[in-house]
């Protein structure tokens, strides 16, 4: 039991590493949460520091989710602990211990977690994310698309269907956590959703096929 709690705490601490906050503090001497959308994530880092740094921050944030899973796996933990450790990393990214509990929206770190657990579902979500991004140029709607695709992807490609068919309670629980992650990410985008409804959401016009 102590080991399980330890692995989950490590997941939270890994997720708490405030990549974008540190990058913008070091390179611009500012708090990213006072700039752009105010979100401490890769997208806002693109706005504040440019695409190159945004991509680096996004990859590090993704690595946090993957690392949490990898540490739990290396510790010999069962699948449900891997999931809890990954969710702890996403929670750490959103509410970081090392940055006054004001972090990002969990997309990149959640993606890293999904990559570590369900690589095929990750590819489907990534495809949906990139497809919507290149059409719209709006990251939030791309992230929400990926969050919506997550539960069905894990159901069909991550063992969810088999778990329901065989009545495997742990497998069903793991699928329910993928549902919870999707909902969590969407809830963290509530300000974006309000802006989308008002037509005020920021768009990267250069990457949008429809708005160039
Ligand atoms: O991953 C966060 C992204 O979906 C939205 O970021 O800065 O536009 O609120 P932002």
Image: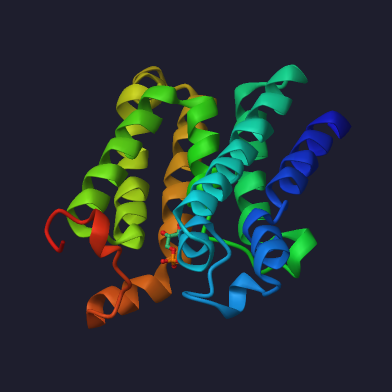
> Residue, x 42% and y 49% (percent of image)?
182
Residue 169 visible in rendering: no
Q: Does residue 38 appear to the left or right of 15 in the view shown?
A: left
Look at the image and name its color scheme.
Answer: rainbow
Horizontal and vertical percent position of residue 43: 46, 59
Q: Between 153 and 96, which is closer to the camera in this rendering?
A: 96
Q: In screen coordinates, is 210 left or right of 106? A: left
The number of callouts visible is 0
Corner quadrant of residue 66 = top right
On screen, 49 above or below 128? below
Res 127 quadrant in image = top left
Q: Is residue 114 left or right of residue 65?
A: left
Q: Which of 193 and 202 lies nearest the eye of the viewer?
A: 202
Q: Position of residue 195 (x, y in %)?
A: 32, 78
* The N terminus sits in image quarter: top right
- Please tell me which residue lies in front, 28 or 118: 28
Toward which corner of the image does residue 30 lie, by quadrant?
A: bottom right
Q: Residue at x 36, y 40 (%)?
A: 150
Q: Is residue 207 above or below residue 116?
A: below
The quadrant of the image that shows the C terminus is bottom left
- The residue at 51%/55% (across/down) is 42
Residue 60 % position (x, y): 61, 42
Q: Is residue 21 visible?
A: yes
């Amino acid at each position: 039991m102590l080991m399980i709690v330890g692995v989950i705490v490590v997941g939270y601490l890994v997720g708490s590493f405030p990549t974008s906050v540190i990058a913008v503090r070091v390179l611009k001497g500012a708090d990213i949460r006072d700039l752009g959308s105010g979100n401490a994530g890769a997208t806002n880092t693109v706005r504040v520091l440019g695409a190159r740094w945004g991509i680096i921050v996004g990859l590090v944030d993704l690595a946090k989710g993957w690392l949490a899973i990898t540490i739990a796996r290396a510790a010999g933990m069962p699948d449900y602990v891997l999931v809890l450790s990954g969710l702890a990393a996403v929670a750490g990214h959103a509410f970081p211990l090392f940055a006054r509990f004001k972090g990002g929206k969990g997309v990149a770190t959640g993606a890293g977690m999904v990559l570590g657990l369900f690589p095929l579902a990750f590819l489907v979500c990534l495809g949906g994310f990139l497809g919507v991004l290149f059409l719209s140029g709006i990251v939030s709607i791309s992230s929400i698309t990926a969050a919506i695709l997550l539960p069905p992807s894990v159901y069909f490609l991550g063992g969810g269907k088999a778990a329901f068919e065989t009545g495997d309670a742990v497998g069903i629980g793991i699928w329910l956590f993928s549902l919870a992650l999707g909902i969590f990410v969407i809830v963290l985008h509530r300000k974006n959703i309000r802006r989308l409804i008002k037509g005020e959401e920021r768009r990267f016009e250069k990457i949008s096929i429809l708005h160039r």
